[in-house]
């Protein structure tokens, strides 16, 4: 019986991995959404930083122009314009590795896992992406904050040394690609699945489902 | 990780959330400490060289020696591997993130220390071997398909390494819970 269960679990695992790879490959190979994705995130970045200059007089602006996107479809450039006639500092941000691929990995995990109903899949995707997007944006902001706070050539604002240490550790541990690009979506997916699984078990104990065994 | 939930018996839904929360908190604490050590910006305190330089050179040496089995032209100098394609082993090439994630998970797992030690040593060795294989593969990609290098390096192989780590942990969790039956831990296939 135990062997039979193991064999069944292994089959489920292989099925899950194949489904994940198919969905992820489909999303990762699709380079078409690059310009739209970059423009959307440039616009979001501009909403977040606002139009006004910082107290130091430094102005921040995200740009993803058509000309730039032709050569680099996944690039958003942060223009840091100091006060006066000093030339702007440009910081290119690769939104593919920092934002798109982790989200694609999460979507693929959420689709590949076997759940009880389509509704649970939609719930997992919606809640997961609603958490993942701001989390990834925050992680992208960490090195920028450190850069603008004194480690870069233009000091837009001042940060204390402990804040710099915290930002640098978070950046090196969680942001520097490719290290954790896929670990964060995996953790989020697993945590949400545990929650869905627990709630599902409480609602209907006879139809207990789990990560690799969803369709009872 | 998936194996934890997959191994949960139907009647164990009351024990798993408690075990899960404790495991998650200990896991996060250990990972935070290890990541803080790894990522600490010593240069902000006047350090002139990376304290991991020696470790990275050793990594380059091991990877270079492995590559020399396939390509005698490979030469290692410091953290550089030169041959038909040049590689430099820098931070993150050592796959320290997945090592930290794996070590934290095994240390946080409620199991006897002897079993945890075995899982830790064997699992880490497997991860190092997997990473050496990744570096060798990258060298091969660089030699034969240089245009694919960035995609392989930044998109495909990190995913493979994370998947390998997760599956490796599922395997070791199965071994660790083998002793957990008496302590009320979930036992796979039981």
Image (cartoon, rainbow, N blue to C red):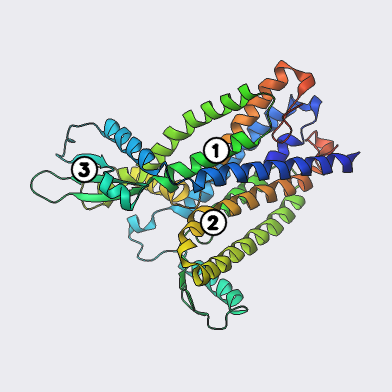
In front: B119, or A29? A29
Residue lying furthest bottom: B72
Discs 1, 2 touching: Cβ within 8 Å: no
**Mark 1, secondary structure of its residue:** helix
Q: Marks 3/2: CA distance? A: 33 Å
Of circles 1 and 2, the one toward us is 1
Q: How crowded is mark 3: few (under 14 residues within 10 Å), some or many (20 or more)?
A: many
- The spot of residue B181 in percent (x, y) is 83, 38
- The residue at which mark 1 appears reads as A106
Q: How crowded is mark 2: few (under 14 residues within 10 Å), some or many (20 or more)?
A: some
Residue lying furthest left: A85
Residue lying furthest right: A1
- The residue at which mark 2 appears reads as B96
Of circles 1 and 3, the one toward us is 1
Task: Say whether residue A169 is left or right of residue B24.
Answer: left
Is residue A103 shown above or below B69? above
Q: Marks 1/3: CA distance? A: 34 Å
Task: Say whether residue A155 is left or right of residue B92.
Answer: left
Q: Residue A156 carries which label?
A: 3
Q: In which quarter of the image is the N terminus of chain A?
A: top right
């Amino acid at each position: 019986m135990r062997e039979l269960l193991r064999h069944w679990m292994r089959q489920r695992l292989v099925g899950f991995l194949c489904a994940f790879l198919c969905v992820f490959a489909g999303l990762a190979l699709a380079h078409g959404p690059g310009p739209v994705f970059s423009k959307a995130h440039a616009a979001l970045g501009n909403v977040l930083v606002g139009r006004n200059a910082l107290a130091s007089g430094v102005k921040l602006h995200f740009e993803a122009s058509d000309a730039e996107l032709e050569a680099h479809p996944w690039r958003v450039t942060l223009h840091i314009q100091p006060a006066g006639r000093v030339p702007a500092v440009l910081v290119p941000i690769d939104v593919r590795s920092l934002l798109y691929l982790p989200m694609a990995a999460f979507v693929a995990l959420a689709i590949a896992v076997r759940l009880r109903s389509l509704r649970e899949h939609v719930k997992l995707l919606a809640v997961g992406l609603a958490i993942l997007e701001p989390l990834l944006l925050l992680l992208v902001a960490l090195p920028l904050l450190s850069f603008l706070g004194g480690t870069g050539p233009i000091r837009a604002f001042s940060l204390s040394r402990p804040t710099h240490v915290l930002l640098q550790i978070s950046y090196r541990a969680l942001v520097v690609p490719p290290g954790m690009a896929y670990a964060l979506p995996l953790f989020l997916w697993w945590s949400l699945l545990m929650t869905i699984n627990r709630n599902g078990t409480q609602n209907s104990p006879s139809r207990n489902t789990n990560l690799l065994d969803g369709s009872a | 990780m998936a194996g934890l939930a997959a191994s949960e018996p139907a009647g164990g839904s009351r024990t798993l959330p408690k075990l899960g929360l404790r495991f998650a908190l200990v896991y996060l604490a250990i990972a935070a400490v290890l990541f803080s050590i790894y990522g600490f910006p010593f240069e902000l305190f006047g350090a002139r060289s990376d304290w991991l330089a020696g470790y990275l050179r050793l990594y380059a040496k091991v990877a270079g020696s492995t590559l020399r089995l396939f390509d005698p032209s490979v030469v290692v100098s410091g953290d550089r591997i030169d041959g038909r394609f040049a590689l430099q082993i820098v931070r993150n090439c050592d796959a320290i993130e997945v090592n930290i994630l794996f070590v934290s998970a095994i240390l946080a797992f409620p199991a006897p220390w002897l079993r945890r030690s075995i899982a830790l040593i064997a699992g880490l060795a497997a991860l190092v071997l997997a990473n050496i294989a990744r570096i060798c593969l990258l060298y091969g990609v660089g030699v034969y398909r240089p245009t694919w290098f960035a995609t392989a390096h930044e998109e495909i192989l990190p995913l493979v390494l994370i998947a390998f780590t997760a599956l490796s942990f599922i395997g070791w969790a199965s071994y660790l819970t083998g002793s957990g039956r008496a302590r009320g831990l979930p036992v796979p296939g039981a």
